[in-house]
Image: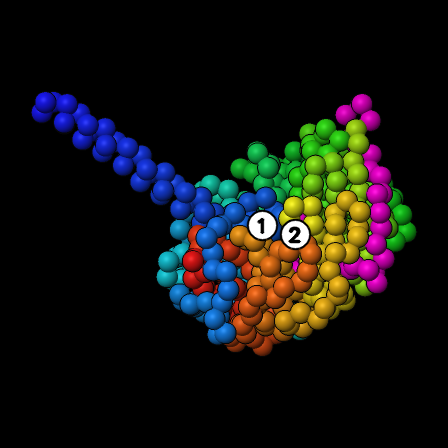
Amino acid sequence: MRFAQSARLVTLGVILAALALEGATSARAGGNWPQWRGPNRDGISKETNLLASWPEAGPPKLWTASGLGAGFSSVSIVAGRIFTMGDRREGQFVIALDEQTGKELWATRVGGRHDDDYGGPRATPTIDGDLLYTTDTDGDVVCLETATGKERWRRSMPRDFGGRMMSSWMFAESPLVDGDRVIVTPGAPRAALVALDKLTGKDIWRATMPSIGSEGSDGAGYSSVVISNGGGVKQYVQLMGRGLVGIRAADGWFMWGYNKVANGTANIATPIISGDYVFDSSSYGTGSALLQLAGDGNGRVNATEKYFLGGSVFQNHHGGFVLIDGVIYGGHGQSNGLPVAIDLMTGRMLWERVRGAGTGSAAVTAADGHLYFRYESGTMALIATDPKQYRLVSSFPIPGVRKPSWSHPVIADGKLYLREQDALHVYSIKR
């Protein structure tokens, strides 16, 4: 009897330990936001049980970290650490903070300051285990150790590949890590995109880009690469100075390009991938497009326009958009973030256009049935993901806004992270 009771206790202990381990693993997974726009680069957090509304002053603030420097970088969060970038007096830095307290753990100078009216870095570090990857505004691709900030390797997109930007603003890309490689966009004719060995920085391939049309400008845009398996072929999709391109992942073969969505000033929004479809938008009067990808039977893919929406219908300046249950949600307008909902497959507008809670462009993230619109004016808004109607739930002012409030919001581990230039504000949004 004693043996049976002991056995039951041991079994119960094993079950409880397993549940505790599962809970700890889930908590760690919930806190993971390893790169630009989250785990899948789509701006969607898998967090649940979040606050359905906020008090007028905003959700409870846990802490604020200051001294991060100027810039518009967002944050990455992995294994109890937060990573971001900022321009300090001595130069441009990658910075690691403790997730619980905001205490600085290390800071590594990666380049010179970006001194203009909208100065500072735009890239968000990409975390891959013990290493992180980022680009500074001069176009250097840098690999650092996540534990110490020690530099492992560095490549220069302008010097090593002849890279250039499509316009006067500097490099803004957040690198993509895919398996054994890092993908970045120099924007050169013979190195439109490049794949680098993630451990050494050495070339794996360089993608040559032909002419795809006269719209836009030569060079890299201000977007970041995403992965598509459209048409049955793995490829890297990017919005460049001349428009959207699809590059075969295996060898860097240029497969398709689409010029119509490009403007000559700044192509910014990260593309949305949905099966065989690619959606993207640019501003300065241009518009948006949905492309369908189809394989040709020889390991290549062709892209066909399903529809194009003119700039008066939907143009996303910057801040991006998200896809939820077949609906695109984002901000419309040049220097505007007018909330819109668009049926992905038809391009039909689902909401009557409204002003919204703030002004200026809106950076958009989604979680747990809500959209998080962070307006350039410094207003943070919570909007229901309801395809039938626009429903503003709550809003509050972000403290200390002095420049355009552009950094993308992050939702991880029951918290809302808002980078505001020199500061990072962290709020509890767990229900």
Q: Position of residue 205 (x, y in %)?
A: 69, 34
The verdict on residue 183 being magenta is: no
Q: Which amino acid does the dot numbered 2 rest on?
A: Val
Q: Position of residue 239 (x, y in %)?
A: 75, 49
Tell which of 426 and 93 is nearer to you.
426
Please tell me in which quadrant of the rendered image residue 321 appears: bottom right
In the image, the segment drawn in magenta is 296-323
Residue at screen point 46% across, 53% down: 49
Residue under circle 2? 322
Residue at screen point 55% across, 68% down: 394
The verdict on residue 306 being magenta is: yes
Residue 72 in sight:
no
Question: In the image as oriented, which residue stretches furthest toward the front?
Answer: 388
Please tell me in which quadrant of the rendered image residue 302 appears: top right
Look at the picture and state if 52 lies above or below 257: below
Residue at screen point 41% across, 45% down: 28
Question: In the image as oriented, which residue stretches furthest toward the right?
Answer: 214
Residue under circle 1? 44
**CA gap, disc 2 to disc 1?**
7 Å
| Marks 2 & 1, CB-CB < 8 Å contact | yes
- Quarter containing the C terminus: bottom left
